[in-house]
Amino acid sequence: MKRSLAALAVGTMLLTPIGAMPALAGAGGASRPAPAQRPNIILIVLDDVGFSDLGAFGSEIRTPNIDALARDGLRYNRFDSKAVCTATRAALLTGRNNQTVRMADLPAERPDPTNMTKDRDELPGNAQTLAQALHAAGYATHAIGKWHLAPEFEDGTPGKNASWPLQRGFDDYYGFISGWTDQYHPALIRGNQPLPKPDTPGYHLSEDLIDHAIGSLSDTTRPNFVYLALGAAHAPIQVPTAYSDHYAGVYEKGWDAIRRERFERLKANGLIPANTVLPPANPGDRAWASLTDDEKLVFARFMAVYAGFIEHADVQIGRLVAALKQRGQYDNTLIVLLSDNGAASEAGQTGSFEGMYRHNQPSIAEMKARLSELGTDKTEAEYQRPWAMAGVSPFRRYKVWPYLGGVRTPLIVSWPRVIHDGGAIRHQYVDTVDIAPMLLDVAGTRFAARIDGVRQIPVAGHSFRASLASGAARETRTVQFFELRGNRAITSGNWRAVAMHRIGSDFTTDQWELFDLSKDPAEARDLSREMPKKLAEMQALWWREARKYSNPPLGEAAARFQQRAPLQDAFPKEKN
């Protein structure tokens, strides 16, 4: 297969100008260890990959290279995202809750200059990023792949690129700015400049991005930070046919059977407790047994393409690891791999065959006649929503929902020089906001409190570095709030409460549920009626945390995405 050539080319609510990197160099941060001791850091972000979509997390999908990272490193089974890509990435790169840095949801077309709340959709200048902090500590910083943290009106030109990677701490950037792109003909950016779309036979974006990641590590005069955000496995699901063909006959048994099989493997592997109960299928999701023979044939191929897409990405990650080993860099490279949210549900019950997020899709008969085109550049497909239910096994719901199916994703941390019990499972609770503080801790630095006299927004995350060396390390996070499109959740130790909200309704009428995760890790049994006092305690805790980190705590401004095509079908519509 031909690969592309590598080309290397905010007071909490006060908006301040975004400073250029030279002004940040040497600003803030703790004293750092000698350069020879500081590891390279590679942060790999998969897209729309569910909790059980990787082999190391119970999947039948072949991911031997990711599994090898897990064998050399650690799997965290209580890692929570923000349930949608932009919100997670904002928290990931700032160490703050996404509401605090005004990224409550996806980027707006053009932020309202008078709006300084959680719904502005533009990172404030006084929220130092992970890249800026590492750059100030002497790291070379490289952003590769998906960004999706810039308002849609920004095109890279002067005055219209303040939210682009080069302006937020990265030395170089190669990737795509928006939320998704075609994997064969992507809309690519280098630095602040758009590039012609690739049109070379054999080209695939995942291969191209890994080529650039390998190239970015060639400078050994200083440690490197590589932020590698792959398009896989966000729609469109596109991959060379040979990878999809690996799964011929695998998915014909259907999503209900695959969900149960993954559930049993997760228990057998110790990733979920033995007492976990698999919740019933989500309301509105069709049972596999109810499908016609043609639907089963077609829908199984969709999942085969998705699985092939992930396997192909795994092969590329394997090339990156091989390059590190060849250069003698692997043992002292900290690799963190995670997914930005639960498995995607945008395409509804029948899937999207061509034209992402379009409602006029071919009939089942037409899909069957064109099944060989699935995964090629002739289609921009997304699988059927019930496959996402299997992808997040054993949890309820999926991407954008406040249940664990939306927020809980795989997290793998590998650093052979430090981790001596490779293959172990860590049970410490970790939130997205904790990743950046941990990485900075490893680098011997921290987020700056002030830069050029400007007070930075306080950081919410806590380093969990101690857990890399010991499974008995003290848990640094016990409480975390969640809010997306008016839907809410609060975690406190083993307790979790979830509230669903209908757009336009009074928030006081929201339905709350209560779960004891020590006895019910998959949120199968609602205890809200049995334990009203505990529920009231959790509700009060949600308000305290939300008022601390979100301005305003609640609101429906971001609910505009209910009407926007990309997430229209994914937004919760049924009552639970």
Image: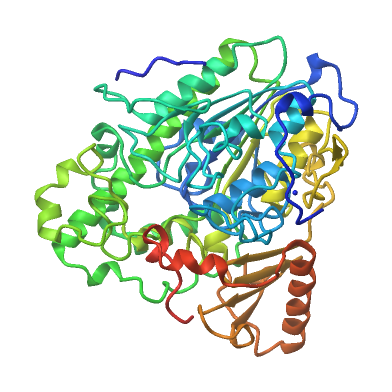
Q: Is residue 340 above or below residue 321?
A: below
Given residues 391 and 363, the one toward you in this image is 363
Q: Is residue 148 left or right of residue 495?
A: left
Q: Is residue 576 above or below residue 463?
A: below
Q: Which residue is depicted at the point 27% across and 45% down?
A: 380
| Image quarter of residue 62 | top left
* x and y percentages locating residue 412 in the rendered image: 61, 40
Given residues 197 and 225, the one toward you in this image is 197
Q: Is residue 529 left or right of residue 285?
A: right
Q: Which residue is depicted at the point 59% across and 83% down?
A: 510
In this figure, what is the number of numbered marks? 0
Q: Is residue 531 left or right of residue 59?
A: right
| Coloration of the structure image | rainbow
* x and y percentages locating residue 537 in the rendered image: 78, 80
* x and y percentages locating residue 70 in the rendered image: 59, 36
Q: From this viewpoint, is residue 397 visible?
A: no
Give the residue at the far right of this rendering: 31
Q: Which residue is depicted at the point 46% across and 72% down?
A: 572
Q: The N terminus is located in which quarter? A: top left
Q: From this viewpoint, is residue 48 visible?
A: yes
Q: Is residue 77 above or below residue 562?
A: above
Given residues 149 and 167, the one toward you in this image is 167
Q: Is residue 330 above or below residue 487?
A: above
Q: Is residue 257 left or right of residue 97?
A: left
Q: Which residue is depicted at the point 55% across and 57% down?
A: 267
* x and y percentages locating residue 17 in the rendered image: 72, 41
